[in-house]
Structures are given as C-alpha cells and as structure tokens.
C-alpha cells in the first residue's frame, strides 16, 4: 500500500467500463494517468475522452506502445487483456514495470469485509442473492466486480465494518497477488474460456486462486459436487465449508452458506427466494405466442449453461445458439437429441457446432439473429419452446450478452 501511494504516473490498460472507473479512482488519489487502448478511438465517447483529457489524462489508441508506456511506474490491467498474448508483457518486462489487475489494485484501498464469488455458472445470481440477504443485517453492503460495477468504482467509499460482495471471473483472478477475501465461494467448475486458459487444468488453477491468500480465520465455501483432488484442497489454508443443494437451487444454497456466517437463517433465504425474480437474460420467459414459449438465455456463454437450461425444459425445443467460440466442444448436446428438434446457428462458431453435432441433431446456419428467430418461429409448433441459449460469447456480433439478449427480446416482441 505504501509503495502504491508513492507512485506518481500509472498506466491504465483498456478503456472499457473498468478502465474508466480506474481512471476516476486514480485521479481521486492524485495520480497522473495514461490510458492505452488497442481499439480505435471511434468506438468510444469522444466527449468523455475530452473531459478526462481536460483533467490531464493522456490517451493512445490502436496500440500499446513502449514510448507511451515506459514512463509509467505501474500498469493496471482491465480483465479483458490477456497478458500471454499482449504486447504489454514485453514492454513491462523490458522497462521493469509491474502489472497488476483492477481487482488486485482496488483491494489495497479497503478495510471492508470482502466476499468473493466465482465459478463457471451462477456467479451473478449468487452475488445478488448474497447482497440482498446481507442487506437485511448490515447497513453498508456493496455489490460489484465482474457483475457490472467495477470494484474500483466504489472502493474508496468503503470502510472497516462494511461488506463488499464481488463477482469474480477467471480473467480477474489471473492477476491476483495479495487479494484476500474473508469469504471465498466456488460454485461449480465446467470447461470455459479455454481459448484464453488453453486447458481445463489451467482454468481450474486460475479459479482456485480465489483461495490462495486466505488464512485460517477465513472461509472457503465450496460446492460438494466439485470433488476437488487432495493436492488442490491441501493448498487451501482457510476453513472449508461444503454446500449442496439443500434449498431450491444451487445458487440459493451457496448464498445461504455465506449468509449463515453473518447470522442469516434458512427462513430468511426462503422468504427472499419467494420474492426473488430471475435476472434478465437467464432463462427469462420473454413471451408465449400461439402456445410457443420464447426463452432468453443470452447469459449462457458456455455449454454447461445451455445444458442446464435444456434440462429444465420438459417439452420439445428449437435451440438458437452460436457466437464467438471459446475453445470447447459441443458433443454433449447429443444427450438432448430427442428433446432438441433443431438447432438454428449464428455467429463464428456456427460451422464448428454444426460439424460436431450435426450428425445427431439437424442444424441450419443463419447470417443474423433475426433470421434465426423468424425461422424458428415458422418451424415451431404449439407446446414447443424456442430457447435462445448461445453457448458462446457475444463479441463476434454484439458488445455483450446483455445487448444480445435485448436484441432477442426486441425481435420476439416485434413478431406481432
């Protein structure tokens, strides 16, 4: 913390939501800020850039250049930047500049109690549930992280006695050094982001970094179904609390195990569950037309999420899927070959999905989401479900899963 306080010029890598939040935080700390961004300037709000420039922030776009960065004493990375592929790595090593992530940096500036939640699926829902449960007992509870509100956006407002609930992704955990949550939760583990992590084992090890700095007085809450091998368990120094689906679902059961540490009861959880509405883009029933259900599951950015959605639907499904491939295979869709009447594919992964599953389930490819939805509606019969559950990231056609899901909702709303 003392070293960070002594730094004068800091480089923020990435000008998305996290980069903007970090820049505001650094300016509040009295730092000089330089922003480096690979994407073109035209993709960003020019007025916002001008406002920051008026405060002394310097920018470079379309590159990460040594000349621009070498005068900095620290590089803070947005989660989307992959150091294994970025030119930033060589620049940092050559100029002896440390690189840390936004999660790690923000952690240095709070004495609040941190609850960190990770896993392949269900992170956002569980974080919301924990936040709402704790709001019943605590005056000051913050919610953020990978959930949409960056940690750095609110960390300077926190103090000892407050509670921070963070959704934490594997990308954020890659750059963890000292980050230490009081309570760390591992919900589940399925193959995901293999295009970045290269293998499931690397992905697993990255997820487990959420426990690395915990001490005996801390708590590690782990889904009993994961069955972590003994070598991995032996590296966890905190008290391990296992959870199973003892309430209505996995997310609520995990939230209860967290809440119990803070005095939350099962009855508190049941009351919350009865009032809790599913978050948008997560198996969200959009509309029923001619007894055909349209479900928006745009948040399903991996195969396991889509398989879970398919499991919950009892009747025939026309699946709309595809997007930017994340490096895993789609063969397990074959388990639902009898339930899935057809798969209508979009995006970069369409050919790969068709190649891997087309011999078991009929597939068609479309140039746009609208074409896929219209075709699905024409083919569907009463009692069918049209499930939009992409299994892939959105970044080939949309800015994020929210924009993708909202587009699906708009298309369905305009069918009549």
Image (spheres, rainbow, N blue to C red):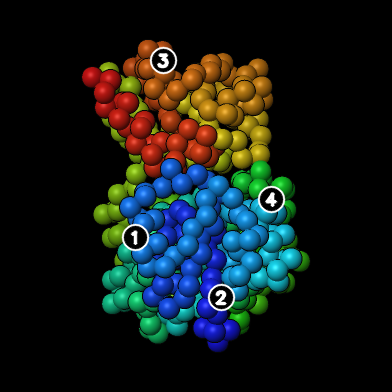
Residue 135 falls left or right of residue 397: left
Q: Secondary structure at mark 2?
A: loop
Which quadrant is the N terminus positioned in? bottom right
Q: Secondary structure at mark 3?
A: helix
Q: Indicate the position of residue 290 as horizontal and vertical percent values.
A: 27, 18
What residue does disc 2 label? 180
Residue in the image at 32% along x and 32% along y: 409
The residue wearing badge 4 is: 85
Specify which label sits upstream in the sequence, 2 or 4: 4
Kindly indicate whether the residue at mark 1 contacts the one at mark 3 (C-beta within 8 angstroms): no
Q: Position of residue 172 (x, y in %)?
A: 56, 60
Q: Nearer the viewer, residue 155 or 116?
A: 155
In contact (CB < 8 Å): disc 3 and disc 4: no
Mark found first going from the N terminus, 2 or 3: 2
Q: Marks 3 and 4, Cα distance to the nearest angstrom?
A: 39 Å
The residue tagged 1 is 51
Instruction: Please identify, in this view, whether the residue under mark 1 or under mark 4 is nearer the observer.
Output: 1
Separation of residues labelled 3 and 1 (CA atoms): 46 Å
Query: In this image, 156 relative to 88: left or right?
Result: left
In the rendered structure, which disc, 3 or 4, sits on the residue that comes first in sequence? 4
For marks 2 and 1, give the CA distance.
35 Å
Q: Quadrant of residue 27?
A: bottom left
Q: Name the residue beneath numbered marker 3.
A: 375
């Amino acid at each position: 913390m003392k070293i960070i306080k002594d730094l004068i010029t800091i480089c923020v890598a990435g000008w998305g939501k996290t980069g903007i939040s970090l820049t505001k935080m650094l300016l509040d700390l009295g730092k000089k800020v330089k922003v480096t961004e690979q994407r073109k300037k035209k993709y960003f709000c020019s007025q916002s850039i001008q406002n920051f420039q008026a405060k002394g922030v310097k920018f470079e776009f379309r590159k990460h250049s040594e000349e621009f960065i070498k005068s900095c004493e620290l590089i803070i990375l947005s989660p989307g930047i992959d150091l294994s592929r970025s030119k930033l790595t060589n620049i940092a090593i050559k100029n002896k500049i440390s690189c840390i992530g936004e999660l790690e940096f923000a952690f240095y500036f709070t004495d609040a109690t941190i609850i960190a939640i990770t896993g392949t699926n269900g992170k956002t829902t569980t974080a919301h549930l924990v936040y709402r449960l704790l709001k019943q007992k605590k005056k000051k509870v913050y919610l953020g992280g990978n959930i949409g509100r960056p940690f750095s956006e609110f960390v300077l407002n926190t103090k000892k006695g407050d509670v921070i609930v963070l959704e934490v992704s594997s990308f954020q955990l890659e750059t963890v050094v000292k980050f230490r949550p009081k309570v760390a939760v591992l919900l589940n583990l399925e193959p995901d982001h293999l295009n970045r992590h290269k293998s499931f084992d690397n992905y697993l090890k990255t997820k487990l970094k959420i426990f690395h700095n915990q001490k005996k007085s801390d708590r590690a809450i782990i889904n009993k179904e994961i069955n972590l091998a003994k070598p991995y368990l032996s590296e966890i120094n905190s008290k391990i609390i296992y959870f199973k689906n003892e309430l209505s679902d996995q997310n609520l059961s995990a939230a209860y195990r967290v809440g119990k540490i803070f005095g939350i009861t099962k009855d508190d959880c049941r009351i919350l569950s009865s009032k809790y509405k599913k978050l948008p883009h997560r198996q969200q029933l959009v509309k029923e037309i001619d007894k055909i259900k349209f479900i928006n599951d745009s948040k399903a950015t991996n195969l396991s999420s889509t398989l879970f959605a398919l499991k919950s639907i009892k009747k025939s499904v026309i699946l709309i899927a595809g997007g930017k491939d994340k490096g895993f295979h789609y063969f397990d869709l074959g388990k639902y070959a009898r339930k899935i009447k057809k798969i209508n594919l979009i995006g970069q992964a369409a050919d790969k999905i068709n190649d891997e599953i087309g011999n078991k389930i009929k597939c068609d490819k479309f140039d746009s989401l609208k074409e896929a939805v219209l075709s699905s509606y024409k083919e569907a019969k009463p009692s069918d479900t049209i499930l939009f559950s992409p299994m892939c990231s959105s970044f080939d056609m949309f800015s994020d899963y929210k924009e993708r899901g909202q587009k699906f909702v708009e298309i369905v709303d305009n069918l009549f």
